[in-house]
Amino acid sequence: MHELIDHCDVIDIVTPTLSHFECAVAALKKSKHVFIEKPLANSVEEARDMLALAVEANVKVQVGHVERFNPAFLAAKQYIGSPMFIETHRLAQFNPRGTDVSVVLDLMIHDIDIILSVVKSTIKKISSSGVAVVSDTPDIANTRIEFDNGCVANLTASRISLKNMRKSRFFQRDAYISVDFFKKSAEVVRLKNVIGEPDPLAVTIELGEGKGTKQIYFENPKVEESNAIKMELESFARSIHDNTIPVVSINDGLYALDVAHQIIEKLKFSAPIIA
């Protein structure tokens, strides 16, 4: 590993989570730019040490939260303004790979990062519950994150489901945005005030006496075909060339990891093992 690092300008760490810290420290101490798969590290303490090293070395670090580059999310993102309720479901069929960590770090962390990227507020409260079915850590978990601005996010993650699902729904004033990360599709439903006589063929909602009428608009944003993994690596290369902050910075990775571990702590008191 050390010989390889010596001969590279940029290091891409795709090892199991338990060894992220060792590999990243070796690269950062030699002032190499680092792309590192999610989760950033095995612990928040490791992640903070990595951040300090990255700042000292003055190099770029990007975390592989690939759903930020999912074409469905990119198509829908422009419609997401100030969501006040978010619901996410990330369900996967059982795969022994990844069971070395909780389902929170294996699956839910994708949605944690997406939510933290669109909700511009600090977290007020986290509640969580889960069950360990086939492994020693929770295999299915549900989490509620409450933000200071009033937004509430409800996340469900499972790695023991019969089908795969990766879907998020964002509710905000006069709009509903649905993103299917698995099928790579998006839908936007918006409400607009009706001025004058509404189109007789339009879908409308009467708000009550004196409150007027709103018309419902359905949109399906065009989702461009793309390779999300390639896009995230290309964006990292641009951040190095242009000396800009990576799309998913090490600070973003640390924030998502910190929230994930807060959830895991909550699960310790609520996740029985089914014998």
Image: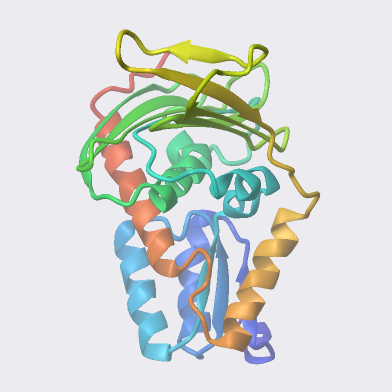
Between residue 221 and residue 254, name the one nearer to us: 221
Residue 39 position, x and y percent, is: 48, 54
Residue 246 position, x and y percent, is: 52, 72
87 relative to 227, above or below: above
Looking at the image, residue 86 sits to the left or right of residue 268; the answer is right
Residue with the most extreme front position: 196
Locate residue 251: give its quadrant. Answer: bottom left
Residue with the most extreme right position: 225
162 relative to 49, above or below: above
255 relative to 197, above or below: below
Residue 64 position, x and y percent, is: 57, 59
Between residue 50 and residue 173, name the one nearer to us: 173
Residue 275 visible here: no
Looking at the image, residue 265 sits to the left or right of residue 111; the answer is left
Total marks in image? 0
Residue 186 visible here: yes
Residue 216 position, x and y percent, is: 55, 22
Q: Quadrant of the N terminus?
A: bottom right
Which residue is located at x 55 percent, y 48 percent?
77
Between residue 247 and residue 265, name the one nearer to us: 247
Which residue is located at x 60 percent, y 60 percent?
15
Between residue 85 and residue 201, name the one nearer to us: 201
Looking at the image, residue 240 sits to the left or right of residue 117; the answer is right
Which residue is located at x 67 percent, y 87 percent?
8
Which residue is located at x 36 percent, y 74 percent?
51
